Image: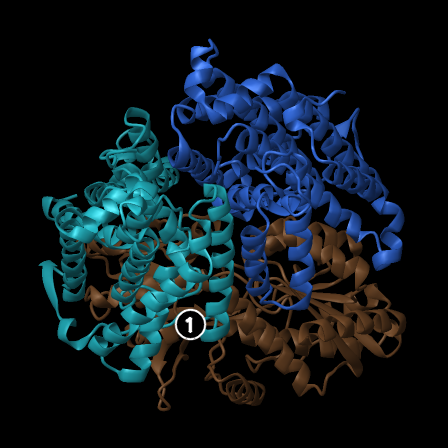
Amino acid sequence: MRWPALTRPGRAVLVLTIAVFVALALAPLFAPWITGERYILGLLARVMIFAIAAVSLDLILGYGGLVSFGHAAFVGLGAYAVGILSAHGITDVTVVLPVTLAVCALFAVGTGAVAVRTRGVYFIMITLAFGQMAYYTATSLAQYGGDDGLRLDHRSTLFGTPIATDPLAFYYVVFGALLFFYLLTRVIVSSRFGRVLRAARQNPVRVETLGFNVGQVRLTAYVIAGMIAGVSGFLLANHILFVSPAYMSWQRSGELIVMVVLGGMGTLHGAVIGSLAFLLIEEFLSTITEHWKVIFGPMLILVVLFARGGLLGLLGGRHG
Amino acid sequence: MRKFGFTAGLVASVALMSATASAQSVKVGVMLTLSGPAAVLGQHARDGFNLGIKHLGGKLGGLNADVVIVDDELKPDVGVQKVQALLERDKVDVIVGVIFSNVMMAISKPVFDAQIPIISPNAGPSPLAGKGCSPWFFSTAWQNDQNHEAMGKAAQDAGYKKVVLIAPNYQAGKDAMAGFKRQYKGEVVDEIFNQVNQLDFSAELARIASLKPEAVFAFEPGGMGVNLVKQYSQAGLAGKIPFLSAFTVDETTLPATQDAGVGLMSGAQWAPNLDNAVNKKFVADYEKQYGHVPALYAAQGYDAALLLDAAIKAAGGKVSDKTALRDALKKTTFTSTTGKAFKLNNNGFPIQDVYSVKAVKRADGKYATEIVAKVLTDYKDAYAADCPLK
Amino acid sequence: MSTTLFVVQLLNGLQLGVLLFLIAAGLTLVFGVMDFINLGHGVQYMLGAYLAVTFYALTGNFAYTLLLALPSALALGLLVEVLIFRHLYDRDHLDQVLATFGIILFVNEGVKIVWGAAPLNVPIPALFSGSIEIMPGLLYPVWRLAIIGSGLAVAVLLWAIVSHTRIGMRIRAGAVNAPMVGALGVDVKTLFTCVFGFGAMLAGFAGIMVAPILSVEPGMGDSVLILAFVVIVIGGIGSIRGAFVGALIVGLVDTLGRSFATDIFRLFLTASAARQVGPAFASMLIYLLMAVILFVRPAGLFPAKGR
């Protein structure tokens, strides 16, 4: 696949990206040596699930210039689609997955139609508002546990049997999804649609005069990002076998933004690296001290001060 | 750097311990909420548990206690992941945790599937008391509705005809009101739901004043409780309308509310002034070591240590046989901080007396709760009947 | 529901509004003037409250507490500005978000290490510890009137500074075109530092004033931060007048919504359904309000000129 000039990453970054994916693919082989147990597959699966959500956010944030502070709502909606259907006995993946996509698409169209009319910090606040509305709605659903959450008995099923019950199998399902969505968004941003989106970020007026409907382009990107994030929610619910409004709090949306920016926004692989870095460092530090935030906070500040373009910026990758 | 040495030491000791685990020590995984605004509850429980181990000479049931403490950050997905680490990486023999019900619900499946006993020093959600009960679940605290029911009974016994309920608009708040109403047969004039983390209660207090109830029942944990109690007193309602509560006025919030909290009532199964040998020693040493008055979360953590000690002794020190350990946990007894013999119901929740307690200012200037009267005797929760276990 | 109760709730709503303005004033100043998203505003507010706790414990006198805590809040704000924020003014908004997120993590945890995790207390100063009876059986603390008074005073002060002083003129000019102002010989760097410090002090002042009536605990600034952003977005970023009006609107809508939503729903739903929908609706109300306002006026009610 020929990558157009503006999105062609530097060599070092390309090597790093491939290395990361290879490492993730081979991690299960090394897992027993690192820790002696396979729980690390669960940890990495959770990290990859959030990486999927971060990649979808980078699509609209890094490429579209739309900073959504309510992106975690899609993750939560995806998770709740699984949870609510499961509470009614519907667990077949051929039903649950399309419903997840449909719910997220509907929510994205409804909220996006209002949100894309705004710009800058107003867009941030409007998406925050919609995220909060989703959160409060979820906590008020007493029949689905409210904020105590909802347990799932087993993973989504195919022809009656739960799929990927083995942690290794589930790990590769998530890895496959991450790879798929990374490549999908890569194709999207390299396409004509992606070029219009990126141009609209830099100079919407000119793009309008060229005959494109900027609002529609943005809305389409927003819906795609929402659906991808919904799939990450679907995977999260299947991974933890538990659904909770906590998945869509504004703090989680903030963490997603941090993951994208930390890695290097507008690069897609930055989102993957950022989420890996953020979640794994958080996990590691919290084993050292309960006051790990006092170390983690300054680390983020140092990255911002000394690495323009996030962690990838340290390697001389494309600036955000 | 100290932290590096600590990590190296931790890794080394984990490796060593995994190798020598079952022989002369018992591995306990403690998972509590130790970060975020609610961290103080986890700290009390952790400190109480650690004090219990210290009083037992660093041993549980004669075995060396090897304790791993992790923070669930009040995030259910983080909790599940860390509990899996405890089960698979650290190979714990028993888990002590957690503080919050949503995390408890999330980790219950992996823990029950792994067939490792879990002792809850706080969270007691109703699904685990009823249909979803498990032989692997034990509690040294209460079923979530217990203290609310106690206040309902107290209100009923005091003859209050009209009561206003106030709680935050989340599941625990709704359960609190349901628990209260289970015992209270008078008229509930209004059920006020405030927002979670609400700061300013003037609107709710104005409404309460306008309804002129004979008493108010509040469930406002953490900062919400501090805000409500302070503002309740500042609005002049403290002396006028009796204030009944659960988890709102306790030793974690009294240092902040101070005089505003004095005289307000709560429902609890424990107070620092319970007069028995176990409790006296616990409270005295806790205050000496940590410098503040223990709250019921600390006593629950302490009792968890005592329960483990008694059970492991009863199981003959063989913690590798999890079924034997589980059965020992169910049947064993010891004298808890309540001064009575610890007794568990079929669903793993304690059968205990519940009191109404009042906040006071002690002679030494510190604030604490004190027993007023026994409200419920040998209380069994309402969900136990749905639990198929015996 | 009586007229008295309605009037009392109106008063409560206005008071909450002024409180929110006090908290949001510093934020809109920094954001509007310097185009800098300061998520750290919430922790500056929290630090003000914690400083009040410490200085009150040391001096036992609220006046001294205020005199000591305000400069300390200013000093901490300036420290952070010089060390970190100064280097970020020309960076992307999102880099600013990342840095201030790091500061939030650091300060929230730092406060827990220094002061402990349990909530702390500052008593109402003796001079203002009285109350007036606004409704039979309901007292209104005089301290809340003091808060309203200080909020109004801050509003007037800011308006006076920004529109009627030389430095206010430079600030407004710097907000529209900083390099040009620099080229005209004004030290924009110092100017921005002053504005940021002043904003930090305002945040700290708000924290000190509310400490007697609210819980002082780690993370107390987080929910306040979101409310403050809602206020300034509704009002229009960079506009003091907008922040004031926005705060009053938010305070009123939130209070009246919380007070009467369930009652209104009870008119056409069953009592239990109303009780489920009412509070959920009330918590969403200010976000709905913001969405509606942004739909009609995408830049807020009184956007500052030049935006």
In the rendered view, tell whether residue A116 sits above or below residue B71. Answer: above
Q: Amino acid at mark 1?
A: Asp
For label 1, the residue is B250
Q: Position of residue C295 (x, y in %)?
A: 32, 26
Please give left or right for residue A161 compared with residue C16 in the image: right
Residue at 19% across / 61% down in the picture?
A: C147
Please give left or right for residue A113 compared with residue B72 in the image: left
Q: Report the chain shown in cyan.
A: C
- Bin the neighbour count of mark 1 within 10 Å (Cα to Cα): few under 14, some 14-19, many 20 and up: many
In this orientation, does residue C12 appear? no
Indicate the quadrant where residue B96 lies. bottom right
Residue at 58% across / 28% down in the picture?
A: A225
How many marks the image carries: the answer is: 1
In this orientation, does residue C105 appear? yes
Colour chain A is painted in: blue
Indicate the quadrant where residue B84 lies. bottom right
Residue at 54% across / 73% down in the picture?
A: B44
Colour chain B is painted in: brown
